[in-house]
Every structure is written in structure tokens, then in C-alpha cells.
Image: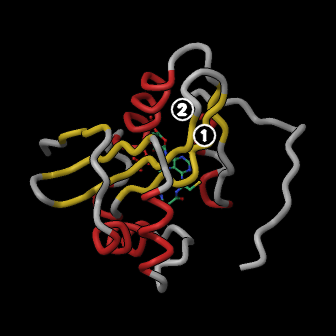
Amino acid sequence: MAIQYLTGKTPSASEVIDLYASAGLNRPIEDAGRIQKMYAHSNLIITAWEGDLLVGVSRALTDLCFCCYLSDLAIRKEYQKNGIGKELVRLTKEAIGDQCMLLLLAAPTAMEYYPKIGMETVNNGFMIKRAR
Ligand SMILES: CC(C)(COP(=O)(O)OP(=O)(O)OC[C@H]1O[C@@H](n2cnc3c(N)ncnc32)[C@H](O)[C@@H]1OP(=O)(O)O)[C@@H](O)C(=O)NCCC(=O)NCCS
């Protein structure tokens, strides 16, 4: 498997929707306009490709000097457990540098994943949930 990693390339909404559907990531994939907007307003997008096929993504918002919120990490189903997710998180951390913390919310199925790739649990987080 020859995977190419690209920083700063924004995939199309349809590529993202196809990836999220395959990964089983719970995002508003029925609304292509909202997906497009999610990507248009993100400033750190790292993608994994096999040829022309989008096989993984890390979508984050960051000030590049203090904080970074990694909103979406998804790997296409048949490409999972090959180290692509771990590499996308590593590249995200590399891009933001040492001054920056990396924060995310884990999906229930990924609660065991993030400690495995070296991330710490936080117990001081708070949120205001979106309405939909
Ligand atoms: C969770 C996800 C991002 C992990 O990416 P991945 O490329 O499949 O995982 P990696 O190959 O980087 O896995 C690294 C290690 O974690 C393990 N692992 C992978 N997915 C795991 C999971 N859901 N729970 C626990 N461990 C997991 C791997 O087996 C591997 O272990 P090893 O080093 O002992 O072999 C990916 O499987 C995915 O897209 N899942 C569906 C969507 C999702 O849940 N996204 C996260 C939203 S918060």
C-alpha cells in the first residue's frame, strides 16, 4: 500500500462524504453544503491518499502557536489499522509545533484508541452542545 500524505489540500465535499460513510464517522454527510463549509473554515487539513482515492483525513482548527482542535479523524474502512490514523495525528502535531496543544473529542468506539497513540485523557473539559 503506497500512501501519500498531503498537508493543505482540501478534498471535495463528495470525497469527504464518501470517506466518512466508509469510516462510519458520525458527521452531517446528508448536507454537502455543511461539509464543504466545515472544510472551507478549517486551517489544518492533512489527507492520506492511495492514488486518487482519499483514504484518510485529519481536519483541525488551530492558531498554530497555542491550541489546536482536531475535529475529524477518519480512515476508510478497508484501510483501517494500517497506521494511517497514527501517522495523520503525528503529522498534525508536527505541523502545529511544540508550543501548541492538541485537543479532541473521541467517538465512543475510539476511546481506547487515543491512549494507544500516546494521548492523555482530560477530565477538565466542558462543552456547549450543538443543537443539531
Ligand atoms: C479510529 C481510527 C481513526 C484509527 O485509525 P487507524 O488508521 O485505523 O488506526 P492505526 O492504524 O493508527 O492504529 C494504531 C493502533 O491503534 C489500534 N486501534 C485502531 N483503531 C482502534 C480503535 N477504534 N480502538 C482501539 N484501538 C484501535 C490499532 O490496532 C493499532 O494498534 P497496534 O499499534 O497495537 O497495532 C479509524 O479506525 C477510524 O476512522 N475509525 C472510524 C471513525 C472514528 O471512530 N474516528 C475517530 C473519531 S474520534
Are the two marked residues, 1 and 2, in contact with CB atoms closer than 8 angstroms? yes
Residue at image point 90% right, 37% down: 124
Q: Secondary structure at mark 1?
A: helix
Crowding at label 1, few (<14), some or many (≥20) Cα neighbours within 10 Å?
Answer: some
Image spot of residue 93 (x, y percent): 49, 26
Q: Quadrant of residue 69?
A: top right
Furthest residue toward top? 98
Q: Is residue 84 above or below residue 34?
A: above
- Residue toward you, 35 or 53: 35
Image x and y of residue 74, in percent: 44, 56
Amino acid type of the residue that numbered disc 1 sits on in the rendered structure: Tyr
Distance of label 1 from label 2 (alpha carbons): 5 Å
Q: Which residue is mark 1?
A: 114
Judge whether 27 appears above or below 108 on screen.
below
Quadrant housing the C terminus: bottom right
Q: Which mark is residue 117?
A: 2
Ligand 1 within 8 Å of disc 1? The answer is yes
Seen as rendered, the residue at the extreme bottom is 30
**Ligand 1 lies under 8 Å from the Cβ of mark 2:** yes
Q: How busy is the neighbourhood of tag 2: few (under 14 within 10 Å), some, or many (20 plus)?
A: some
Whole-percent x, y for residue 44 in the image: 44, 40
SS under mark 2: loop
Question: Splitting the image into 4 quarters, where does residue 109 fall?
Answer: bottom right
Instruction: Measuring from the top left, give residue 116's x and y in whole percent.
Output: 57, 34
Q: Give me the residue at 66% from left, 30% from top.
A: 67
Identified at 39% across, 29% down, the residue is 91
**Label total for image:** 2
Q: How is the image coloured?
A: secondary structure
